[in-house]
Structure formats: C-alpha cells, structure tokens
Image (tube, grey):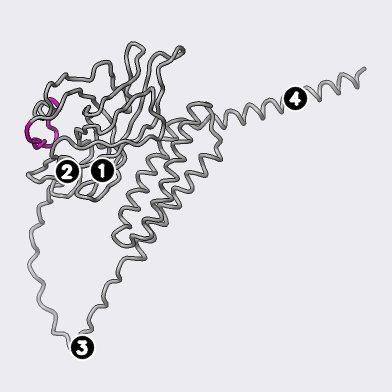
C-alpha cells in the first residue's frame, strides 16, 4: 500500500511539473503585446528611410531591398492581426521578423557606405612654403535655424483630402488608399509640400459594427508622401476628420501650425465641421457612434500629424 501511495505521489508531482511548464510556455507566448508589434512597425519606418538614403547611390540595390521591405511590412501587419484575434503570439515568430528587419537595415547602411565615391588622394607637395603665422581666431558662427533645413518637421499637421471612400463595413486590413494635400505647407516663405501632393495610407485595423460589438472602429495610418514625383517614407497619424462638399477658389497656403478651420474654410464649400458620427481616439483610431459603420466619403479631409521629421 505504501508503494501505491508513493507511485501516486510521483505521478502527481510529474503532472504538476507538466502543468507548470505549459503555463510558463503560455505566459511566454502572451508576453508579446501590441506595443511590441508597434516597435516592429517603427523599425520598418526606419528601414524605409535607410533604403531611401541608399537609392541615390545604388538605385538597383535599393529597389531590391524595397521589395524585401514591402514583404516584411506585410508580415508585421499579419502579426498585428494575429495577435488581436488569437491574443497570443509565439516569441519565435516575433524574433524572426525583428531579425530580418534589422538585417535589412544593416545591409542598406553598409551598401550606402560601400557605394559612396572614394575621396580623391591628397596632392603631394614637394617644396612646401614655410608655415604661415597662425591666423587670428574667428568668432564663433551663429547656429543656423533648423527651419532652413529641407524637411518636414516632426509634429507638422497636414490636411489630406481622401481620393477613396473608407468604410469599416467593407475595408480590410492592409487595404491601401490615397489622398492629396489640401494646401501648400509653407515654412519660412518656402513651399515644402505643394498642394496636391499624394499621401498613401493603409488600413491598420478594422472592426465592423455587429451584434456582439456595436461600436465600429477603424485605424488608418499614412506611410508615404510623394512630392514633385519623389516618394518619402513617413509615419502619419490621423487627429481630426472634417466633412465638406466640393472645392471653391484657389488652394491657399498653409503655414506650419495653421488652424484646421482657417485652412478648411478657404478650401471647402458647405463646410459641416467635424465628420458626423465619427470620433478620433488615441493612436488615430476612428470610431463610429450609435452602432453605425465608420464611413468617410470621398473628399473628406483628414488632419494628419507627421510623427517624426522627414528629410527631403
């Protein structure tokens, strides 16, 4: 009888160990959060900038890397959707995508260095003149204003008129759409972004209205802007949605920090203010009220905040 009790005790201990191992493995898988996936998305934006910097030096290699990067961007969106639906994500899946993004960034930077033209050799002076007397020290130069740099500063807000209809009932994750800037962005008298520049957006997540979840939600982000035929990677977050009808008069020039009312009032006829039945939440999530779908008609204007500086 004592042996039977001993055997039962051992079996129970083994079962407890297996249960603890399974619980530990489950907890490890659950450690990956949406914030972690957002870090992958941030790495993709940085990689796009590395590839963009390589393009003037080696366009063929940059195009090849851009194709790889597009695939990685799609995989990050897949991980985001999988984590939201299944609530768990294997650490190995996350690490694999993270490693591939960092590898691509490293190759892009190395390729840019290796393809840069070598500096010419210094001339050989056979009979140098005697050294001249040291010149008087110059007064320190005044630092130049950062606004003189050709870039879109961080936290700049642009008004973008949608070229497509966006509806949470029909939109799918990874759907691409476009809009055009509604006014010139002028900084220190220079037009940095002309009106009509194309901005590309992507549907990051979408939840249609239904019986279980009556509140429809859709998150859209902007990842590219094309200025005078040249494209630049960006990270843009929606902060406001404006509803209007038609276009009137010439497009005005919008200085940095101009109010959305002043800009929209000079562009759209029949301005209705904020889009009816639409709320903008944290991170640019667009939510509908009263159990309806999120619907942004063609011609709606989204105010988009550029999260980090964009060198042009």
Residue marked by disc 3: 126
Residue 141 in the figure: left or right of residue 284? left
- Tag in front: 2 or 3: 2
Q: Is label 1 in a helix, a strand or a loop?
A: strand
Residue 56 in the figure: left or right of residue 273? right
Residue marked by disc 2: 193
The correct choice, above or below, for 21 with respect to 120 in the image is: above
Name the N-terminal-most of marks 2 and 3. 3
Name the N-terminal-most of marks 1 and 3. 3
Q: 10 or 217: which is nearer to us? A: 217
Name the N-terminal-most of marks 1 and 4. 4
- Tag in front: 1 or 4: 1
Name the N-terminal-most of marks 2 and 1. 2
Q: Could you tell me residue 212's position as x and y percent? A: 46, 13
Q: Label 2: few (<14), some or many (≥20) within 10 Å?
A: many
Q: 209 or 91: which is nearer to us? A: 209
- Is label 2 in contact with label 1 (beta carbons under 8 Å)? yes
User: What's the CA distance linking mark 1 and mark 3?
Assistant: 54 Å
Q: Is label 4 in a helix, a strand or a loop?
A: helix
Q: 198 or 134: which is nearer to us? A: 198
Picture residue at 30% right of the left edge, 22% below the top:
295
User: What's the CA distance linking mark 4 and mark 2?
Assistant: 65 Å
Residue 191 in the figure: left or right of residue 108? left
Q: Quadrant of residue 138?
A: bottom left
User: What's the CA distance linking mark 1 and mark 4?
Assistant: 57 Å
């Amino acid at each position: 009888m004592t042996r039977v009790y001993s055997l039962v005790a051992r079996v129970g201990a083994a079962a407890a160990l297996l249960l603890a191992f399974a619980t530990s493995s489950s907890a490890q898988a659950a450690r990956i959060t949406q914030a972690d996936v957002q870090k992958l998305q941030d790495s993709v934006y940085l990689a796009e900038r590395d590839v963009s910097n390589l393009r003037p030096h080696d366009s063929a290699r940059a195009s090849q890397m851009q194709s790889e990067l597009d695939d990685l961007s799609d995989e990050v969106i897949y991980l985001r959707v999988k984590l939201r639906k299944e609530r768990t994500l294997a650490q190995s899946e996350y690490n694999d995508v993270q490693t591939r993004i960092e590898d691509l960034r490293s190759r892009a930077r190395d390729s840019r260095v290796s393809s840069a033209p070598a500096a010419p050799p210094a001339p050989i002076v056979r009979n140098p003149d005697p050294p001249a007397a040291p010149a008087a020290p110059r007064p320190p130069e005044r630092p130049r204003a950062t606004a003189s740099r050709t870039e879109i500063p961080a936290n700049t807000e642009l008004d973008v008129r949608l070229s497509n209809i966006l509806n949470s009932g029909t939109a799918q994750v990874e759907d691409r759409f476009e809009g055009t800037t509604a006014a010139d962005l002028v900084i220190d008298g220079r037009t940095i972004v002309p009106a009509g520049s194309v901005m590309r957006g992507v549907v990051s997540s979408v939840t249609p209205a239904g019986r279980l979840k009556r509140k429809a939600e859709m998150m859209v982000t902007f990842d590219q802007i094309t200025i005078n035929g040249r494209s630049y990677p960006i990270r843009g977050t929606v902060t406001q949605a404006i509803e209007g009808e038609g276009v009137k008069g010439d497009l005005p020039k919008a200085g940095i920090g101009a109010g959305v009312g002043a800009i929209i009032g000079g562009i759209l006829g029949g301005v209705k203010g904020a889009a009816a039945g639409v709320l903008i939440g944290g991170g640019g999530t667009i939510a509908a009220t009263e159990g309806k779908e999120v619907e942004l008609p063609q011609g709606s204007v989204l105010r988009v905040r550029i999260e980090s500086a964009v060198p042009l």
